[in-house]
Image: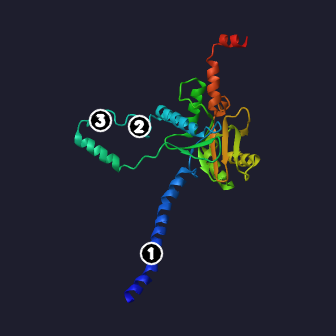
Amino acid sequence: MDATSKKRKAEPEQRVEGGNKRANGKRKWSMPRKAAAEARAIQPGDVGIWATCAMKKEAKSVADLRDLFQEYVSKMYELDHAGGTAEDGDGDEDQGDIEAEIQKELDGIRKPTAKPLFTSVKLDTQCLIFFKTGQPVDPVTFVQKICQDAADGVEQTRCRFVKRLTPITAIDKATERGLDDVAQQVLAPHFHGPDRSGKKFAIRTSIRNNKEFTRDKVIKTVAAAVGPGHKVDLSGYDLLILVEIYKQNILGMSVVGSDFEKLKRYNLAELLDASEDSDKDPAETDDRVG
């Protein structure tokens, strides 16, 4: 009886211990999942490229843009898809040396996995896409090159459903302080300093699903951050400041050049359509109209 009673008394304690182990196990595994989710979200300090696309074509547009971006990484930075130089692995003098090959494989295993140059972020807003970019990609130069080539009729990966591309140089939280911090960071290289005076500028805002900011409030804050010695010129600007606000937690900014309007406001679909129209024979066009 004593042994049986001891066994019965021990059972509740054992069940509690087992339950704690399971609970601890759940808490232990929740952290990597949370970290992975945060890594895939847009965070302060990120840079990247916004893109708009046709409705219900987000997945296809993400795939097309990834191919297009990889194509231009190879062109502009001589990097392969994994982020290494295009020449990596070519002309290895020890290619026939078995020991050297084994050592190379071991070294590759020991190296940390390189961060991808482009990471798409899943959004719950239709027709909107965001790609985080990594070094050495500069979003402004990168997007400008893609759009200029599209305008010039350069053959490139076709993105059938992609519309506007918007490069973002810095991102912070969508707060007044976040706007001030991003403005100081992004505008300083273009407007601050004795050799950068006398710039004509304009400001273009895009606010999605955010009721805290108004267009006038954003423009007033950004214009103040530009500082003295510069002039607003909406049609003949030297530099255009792009401000993108998304929901309650994402605010991004960049500065682009005076070719923004000429490049159809970086609308890839319009640029490709215009390029195709310019390639048509005028006589053929007249025949169709007549």
Which element type, helix, strand or loop, lies under badge 3?
loop
**Alpha carbons under labels 3 and 2: distance apart:** 14 Å
Q: Is residue 275 visible?
A: yes
Which element type, helix, strand or loop, lies under badge 2?
loop
Which residue, given by chain and number where applicable, does mark 2 sit on?
A: 85
**Alpha carbons under labels 3 and 1: distance apart:** 58 Å
As shown in the figure, which amino acid type bears the numbered disc 1?
Glu
Q: Quadrant of the C terminus?
A: top right
**Between 228 and 15, which is closer to the camera in this rendering?**
15
Which element type, helix, strand or loop, lies under badge 1?
helix
Which residue, given by chain and number where applicable, does mark 1 sit on?
A: 17
Residue 88 screen position, x and y as percent: 37, 37
**Between 87 and 57, which is closer to the camera in this rendering?**
57
Number of labelled discs? 3
Residue plotted at (74% across, 47% down): 220
**Between 191 and 14, which is closer to the camera in this rendering?**
14
Residue plotted at (42% across, 81% down): 10
Residue plotted at (57% across, 27% down): 149
Q: Is residue 107 left or right of residue 279?
A: left
Q: Is residue 106 left or right of residue 215?
A: left
Residue 20 screen position, x and y as percent: 47, 72
Q: Is residue 227 visible?
A: no
Within 10 angstroms of label 2, few (less than 14), some, or many (20 or more) residues?
few
**Between 210 and 32, which is closer to the camera in this rendering?**
32
Which residue, given by chain and number where applicable, does mark 3 sit on?
A: 92
Residue 33 screen position, x and y as percent: 50, 57
**Alpha carbons under labels 2 and 1: distance apart:** 54 Å
As shown in the figure, which amino acid type bears the numbered disc 3?
Asp
In the picture as drawn, the residue positioned furthest to the front comes out as: 1
Residue 172 screen position, x and y as percent: 61, 52
Residues at discs 3 and 1 in contact (Cβ within 8 Å): no
